[in-house]
């Protein structure tokens, strides 16, 4: 999921149509296609601040994405006009996370400090790996961008303080 603004998340893009009844082929940016549910209000537009709200009528898996049927989009011509548009959902419709779980959009932008209060930089990206995610932290040092890769492990990430937008880490030796 990407972060277009404070209230909405971009969760996919309409890449084409399928059939004559208005089905839309979607590339999902969400971790799971389960986010697309019947009767979910979804905003469609080129940008998050210029969208139209539709309700999902039906969802079916399709190759590496999903096929969506939307209320009011019931033929190929109406569907074709939406190709290339993005799909956004309101953050408030997302399920609540467990205590030690976070959405990526909550973490991106956090200021990262060591347990000794040394500033490392800003968390700018997250890499999925086989064993654990890796946080990509960038800092400008003498006009050069420095990158630090931090394993997203409980033994390394000591604190996540969302209200203060801070993450504290205890770096393993060698980082």
Image (tube, grey):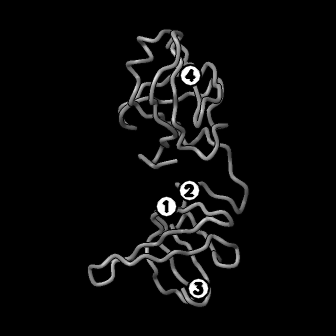
Q: Residue furthest front?
A: 63
Q: Secondary structure at mark 1?
A: loop
How many numbered callouts? 4
Q: Is residue 91 above or below residue 84?
A: below
Instruction: Using the rendered image of the protein, determine whether residue 62 is visible from the camera's viewpoint.
Output: yes
Q: Dots 2 and 1: beta carbons under 8 Å?
A: yes
Q: Dots 3 and 4: beta carbons under 8 Å?
A: no
The earlier-in-sequence mark between 4 and 1 is 4
In the rendered image, residue 133, in percent from the top left (x then y), is placed at 61, 65
Q: Quadrant of residue 135?
A: bottom right
Q: Counting other residues with Cα less than 10 Å from the Cα at mark 1, is it few (<14), some (14-19), or many (20 or more)? A: some
In the rendered image, residue 87, in percent from the top left (x then y), is placed at 48, 34
State the separation of the CA atoms marked 3 and 4: 46 Å
The earlier-in-sequence mark between 4 and 2 is 4
Disc assigned to residue 104:
2
Q: Residue furthest right?
A: 98
Disc assigned to residue 55:
4
């Amino acid at each position: 999921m990407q972060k277009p603004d404070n209230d909405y998340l971009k969760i996919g893009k309409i890449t084409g149509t399928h059939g004559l009844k208005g089905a839309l082929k979607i590339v999902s940016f969400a971790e799971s296609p389960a986010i697309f549910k019947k009767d979910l209000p979804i905003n469609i537009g080129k940008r998050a601040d210029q969208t139209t709200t539709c309700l999902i009528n039906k969802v079916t898996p399709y190759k590496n994405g999903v096929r969506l049927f939307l209320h009011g989009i019931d033929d190929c011509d109406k569907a074709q006009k939406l190709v290339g548009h993005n799909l956004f959902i309101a953050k408030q419709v997302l399920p609540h996370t467990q205590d030690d779980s976070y959405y990526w959009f909550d973490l991106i932008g956090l200021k990262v400090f060591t347990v000794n209060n040394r500033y490392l930089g800003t968390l700018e990206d997250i890499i999925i790996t086989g064993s654990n995610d890796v946080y990509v932290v960038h800092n400008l040092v003498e006009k050069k961008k420095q990158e630090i890769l931090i394993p997203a492990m409980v033994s390394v990430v000591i604190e996540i303080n969302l209200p203060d937008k801070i993450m504290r880490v205890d770096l393993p030796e060698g980082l």
